[in-house]
Image (tube, grey):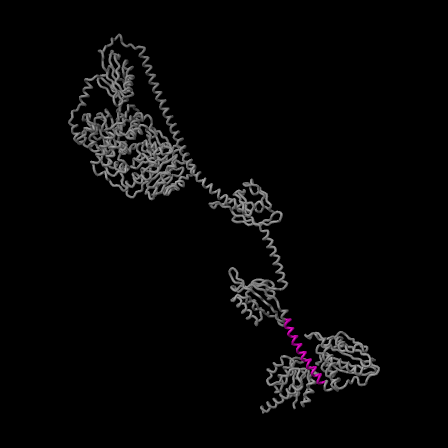
Amino acid sequence: MAEDGAGNRADNRAETTDTALPVVGIGASAGGLEALREMLSEARLPTGMAYVVVQHLDPNHDSLLAELLSRHTALTVRQAEAGERVQPDHVYIIPPGHGLEIAGGALELTPFAEPRGLRRPIDDFFVSLGEDARTLSACVILSGTGADGTLGLRAVKENGGLALVQAPETARYDGMPRSAVGTGLVDFVLRPSEILPRLRDYFARAIGGSDTVAGTGDQIDEICEALHEQTGHDFSGYKHTTLARRIQRRMQVMQIEDPSRYRSRLRGDRTEARALLRDLLINVTRFFRDPEHFEALRETVIAPMVAAARDEDDIRVWVPGCSSGEEAYSIAMLFAEECRAQERAPRLQIFATDIDEQMLEIAREGRYLTPALPDIPEALRDSYTIQHGDHFRIAPQLREMIRFSPHSVIKDPPFSRLSLISCRNLFIYFGERLQSGVLPIFHYALEPEGVLFLGPSESIGRHEEMFAPLDHKARIFRRGETRGRYPIELPAARSIASRAGSGAERWESRERAPQPGLALQRLAERYARPCVVLDRDGTMIESHGRLGRYFEFSAAGGGAAAQAARPGLREVLMPLMREALDNRRRVISRDIEVRAEFGRQRLDVIADPLADETVLLVFRDTDAFEAEPDDDLLEIGPSDGQVEMLEGELRHTRRQLRDKTEQLETANEELKSSNEEMMSMNEELQSTNEELSTVNDELKVKVDQLSVANDDLKNFFDSTRLPVVVLDGDMRLRSYTEAALAIFPLQPGDKGRPLSHVSSLLADDGFLDAARRVVAGEEDVRLRIAQGDGTKQWMLNVRPYRLLDGRRDGATLVFSDITEVLALQDQLGREREQLELALRLARIGIWDYSPETGQISVDSVQAELLGLTGAGSHPVERLLARIVPQDREAMRDSLETSLSEGRDFAAELRLIAPQGERPRHLRSLGRLVSGRSERRMIGVTFDVTADRHAAETRELMIREMNHRVKNLFAVISALVTTTARGAADKEDLAASLRGKIAGLGRAHALTNDLEGLHGVPFGDLVAAMLEPYAGQVPLSASGPAIEAEPQEVTPLALILHEWATNAAKYGALRDGDGSLDISWEAQGDGGWRLIWRETKPAHDPASGSAGGFGSRLVEISARQLGAELDNRRDGTIFEWTLTKHAHQPG
Amino acid sequence: MAKILLVEDELLIGWDIKDTLEEAGHEVDGPYATVAEALERVERALPEIGFLDVRLADGEVDPLADRLQAQDVRLVFHSGHIRALDHGRRYPGCTVCAKPSTPDELVEAVAQQVARRKGGGLAAE
């Protein structure tokens, strides 16, 4: 803890935490990936901590870090997003191109203000982490070059957080770890794999541990004692609460729970003692802390002080406990600005001291992080700071004004003749006793009107007699009139060995001691030889005794001793002083003659180096003063002028040298920052390179997998018989199968060529258009395409080629050979045509009945058969209405039976015919087919009218035949009885009957038309009846082609038979000397006339009468015919005439 | 002894039947070949027995048979037609002779009807 350390911000908040989440910031750069992996792979869930990884990343590349890390750790790894609240067991990775900060437990992405190379993202994040998570923060610095993280680490530590660093020897690049270790603030230096367990242990103690130390003051005293032994710094006078907290923290780090054990550890472990010292010295300081107090200081103290000072006057300021220098620089700025404003140039000296060497180092460098810049009032910023990206430096003229040196307020002698002491926020760490010891020192060190400036919560306690308040609120005090006395015994200037009693006793004894300071002062002023104290630059700091013989004090000289020295002394003064300082020995210069305007003096000059880099010069006169006579007024030797001139030149040269040095320093700094920029760019590139090489390893594995997949694909392509061509988004060939060569004569080098440049055997290039459409966004294009020579037909199916993420990049062309399919299709078409033709010719109708809808669809033939209006769908009822009622029910039943039992349907039906026509007969056959969704019955219908009519006719004819045969039998039966009545004997009867039956037989042989539509031609009938007599006598038969009706055949046959029988027995057919002429003619009224004319030289008178029976048969037959019978005899002619009139009912 | 109206369109058969029945002692009017002729005859003189062929030159004999039945004339049907038996059912009490039948069968059939006519007449009286 520093002697400045303020009301440490962390102190204002509770350091114990209840359920808060520890946040671990991890800074890494080159070589960091490896270290991160090693570190995070140790994670065992739950860790109860959140992790934020800040890596130097190339802003132009996506980082794969999250992906790479997540494979090696149980923690959830993700790239950080703005506004995200950190969760336990999550690792957040900084995204490229952004800075990262944490505020209120939430991550925020910040734009980089600095140019690339000057960015310090790790520092930035650690600063915000320290402020946000306080004691629950931890920072880890892993491999990397440069020093990023080192400043941030301090911020974490200032806020009570933990600092861990990868052991530099385990880091691939140890720049960052070494720089961090160099601060001395690091709690642990570990291998990466040891970091997580240690963090876990630490935070478990922090959260679960109790205040085991704070209670007992004795234990703290003992620890302080041990620390004093080890380090020489005594903290026993410090406030116990603060001490307890810091010691507690160290014990957590050391995993020690018992304070006495810690004390023993401290005694035997110098390193731990250093660590505890460092922790105790950590502090927070700022520029212009409590700005209104500083303003008060400027107004009431600084401005008057500058106004009162003459140019050669010294203004000496002491800032004890300066820590990293912010307070000292703040005061320096105020003075410098005031001098500038009042155009004065007093000699301003600021002594800034601290016991912490490392802090002093920072202070001397005057380099601070940019976030601190706003603390400096804007008006002062430009004049006194030089900005370098993420940090700024204090201007050189200010740095030169301040002397930073290690010094303990408690144990080292104080400065003197001070105009101002600024000691802010140091007393807050001190116990009251210690405060009481330090205030008198301040009183002594200040010149009579000197001013003391304290922190806002500090006071001068019971020392009102020493200090009177000047501005109570701003804690500004003026030194009282009380004479200053030098505190012989400094509060801590006691030997460890002699330390026995309590502090109080020690202070009491010191109060009673004589005051040798006054005597010394008197001695120096009156009795001692004259002497001066010079600082390293030869400036006179103190003087005692009468110095007029040796120095010439003038307005121009200022405090520079060499200039003030009188000739003679002037030449030796500086060499003497340097010799003394450089060699740290007393040096004497003997028998020097110093010339003044009023005389000369010989003397020895002794230079004695003092501890604080100053030199005490003692003048010892060796001779009496020799007055100069007036006439010998002034001898200015040429050598004197020469020396003065040379000295002037030297001064000039020195000034130039200093200017040049400053310029060089500036240039050097610029070079340094350029170098830093280069380094960090290199670092970023290194990180990127590591990521890339890891990615490369993974890619190698992927390449192996891909080559297997590629082999599979190649084999598929080689083995498939399907021509496939794959195109990319630019219609260029990506790949193709062997079979595709049958269409595209491709060469291996054609891959990558546009498809449109490739020749094909296809008849046209419609495939190009199809492919283009699919590439442009159509889903699935089908195309029939013929080979140019007509031997093949292809079905082209173009489908989009999709990438893994679903994007469309090209098209796949798949060709299917459909030549045979098409041929088959053609054949089927032809066969269907044939079938249709057959059906049409055979007049077979086709119907398709759906029981569900009750609709029947019919083709044109069916429609025609049924007399429907046309092909198409009709309600089945319309069809049934066409059927004769007798068949309708049968038809319906048959249909339903078929449907319910799944049998074939067969029915014969008659259609209602127009009046006077016979009904048409149709036969219909059907079969149930179970389709995809519904049952249907498909069937055919054909016209059987002709068959049915033929059958009816046949039946009719059979009946007719039956009737006629029976009738004939009846006629024969009648002939028998009739003939029997007239027959002479049996022979006569038999012969007569045989003749009649034979004649009837011949006549009936002519009547084969059973339908009775056609009669028998007269010629045929006559020829048949006269057949037995042909050739016996001349016969002639003549007449028109008229016919006898069927019912006329039997009577005509009987008549002709009787006439022939009679002619054979008595007439022209007997004896062979006659002739017979038979003729017939049609009558005008539709009747006919048959004339039978016999010519014989001598007729038997019996002819014509024909006997009883014969003539009766003829008569009956004639009546039957309804004809008139007549005969006449005229000489040789005998003639029968049979005349039939039409429409005479016979 | 009865007055018989003979209707037969095949005159040869008709005359044979006429001879047969006259020999059996009956008085035969006919043969008539058509229904029209026969109906005309019946208007003038009603027979006691109708001896009828079924199918005639001008159609079925039914109109005549109905008429005769209505006048209580006994009927004998003489037909080769298969439907002759139907007439037997349509005209109760008639006799049907298949064509061809022997003369004795015809005479017996007429005798049967004569007897029924007498029986029926007696019964009626």
In this rendering, the answer to whether A727 lies above or below A581 is below
Residue A739 magenta-highlighted: no
In this rendering, the answer to whether A339 lies above or below A1023 is above
Q: Residue furthest left?
A: A512
Q: Position of residue A736 (x, y in %)?
A: 54, 44
Q: Residue furthest front?
A: A987
Quadrant position of the C terminus of chain A in the picture = bottom right
Q: Quadrant of residue A75?
A: top left
- In the image, taking residue A635 as reference, residue A730 lies left or right, namely right
Quadrant position of the N terminus of chain A in the picture = top left
In this rendering, the answer to whether A330 lies above or below A543 is below
Q: Is residue A721 visible?
A: yes
Q: Residue furthest right?
A: A1097
For the point 51% across and 49% down, which residue is it?
Answer: A779
Q: Which residues are magenta?
A: A949-978
Q: Main secondary structure of the magenta part?
A: helix
Q: Quadrant of residue B83?
A: bottom right
- In the image, taking residue A743 as reference, residue B31 lies left or right, namely right
* Count of marks, rendered view: 0
- In the image, taking residue A277 as reference, residue A918 lies left or right, namely right
- In the image, taking residue A851 as reference, residue A984 lies left or right, namely right
Residue A997 versus residue A616: which sits nearer the camera? A997
For the point 67% across and 88% down, which residue is it?
Answer: B21
Residue A211 versus residue B33: which sits nearer the camera? A211
Q: Quadrant of residue A22?
A: top left
Q: Position of residue A795 (x, y in %)?
A: 57, 50
Q: Position of residue A272 (x, y in %)?
A: 27, 33
In this rendering, the answer to whether A939 lies above or below A60 is below
Q: Is residue A4 visible?
A: no
Residue A959 magenta-highlighted: yes
